[in-house]
Image (cartoon, rainbow, N blue to C red):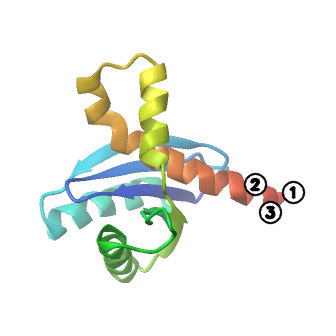
Amino acid sequence: MERILGLDVGDKTIGVAISDPLQFMAQGVTTIIREGKKRDFAALENIINEYNVKKIVIGLPKNMNGSIGPQGEKVLKFGEKTKNKFNIDIIYIDERLTTVAAERILIEGDIRREKRKKVIDKVAATYILQSYLDGMGKERF
């Protein structure tokens, strides 16, 4: 079964989530600590191969007015390189406020601050992917 990968791409980390085989639910997998393009892409390649990923959903940070700023440009560049390197479909989804929502979920779950820092990107990636899967669900039925 093909799965969909969700990514929350930052300068220091990449939060990673994966869909279940039926593409209904997203689950956090890991947080890749960015150590240069070669290592970042090697880590991604392992995940793509392990889960038979055929599509990647990347959170696109936009400014509150909907425009794309410097961080958004970096994410678009990363997505383009990922698409070319792995010959894989890339879908961008507006990620405004996903980190805020992820933080709120972790706070409500009574997760301590140090622990939140370690998992926030993975939770944000899960939120991004789940938003996409929920939208896809409307098309399925």
Q: Residue furthest left?
A: 35
Comparing 126 with 107, the one in front is 107
Residue 80 location, quadrant = bottom left
Q: Residue furthest bottom?
A: 84
Residue 119 location, quadrant = top left
Label 2–label 3 contact, CB within 8 A: yes
Graded by Cα atoms within 10 Å as few (under 14), some (14 to 19) or many (20 or more), the crowding at tag 1 reads few
Labelled disc at residue 137: 2
Left or right of 61 in this view: 119: left
Comparing 46 with 44, the one in front is 44
Residue 28 in the image, given as x and y percentages of width and height:
44, 40
Left or right of 15 in this view: 4: right
Disc 2 is placed on an element classified as: helix
Q: Residue furthest right?
A: 141
Q: What residue lies at 71% left-to-right and 59% top-to-bottom?
A: 136
Disc 3 is placed on an element classified as: helix
Residue 10 in the image, given as x and y percentages of width and height:
28, 57
Residue position marked by numbered label 1 in the rendering: 141
Amino acid, disc 1: Phe
Label 1–label 2 contact, CB within 8 A: yes
Amino acid, disc 3: Glu
Q: What residue lies at 25% left-to-right and 66% top-to-bottom?
A: 41
Labelled disc at residue 139: 3
Graded by Cα atoms within 10 Å as few (under 14), some (14 to 19) or many (20 or more), the crowding at tag 2 reads few
Q: Residue furthest front?
A: 65
Comparing 110 with 17, the one in front is 110
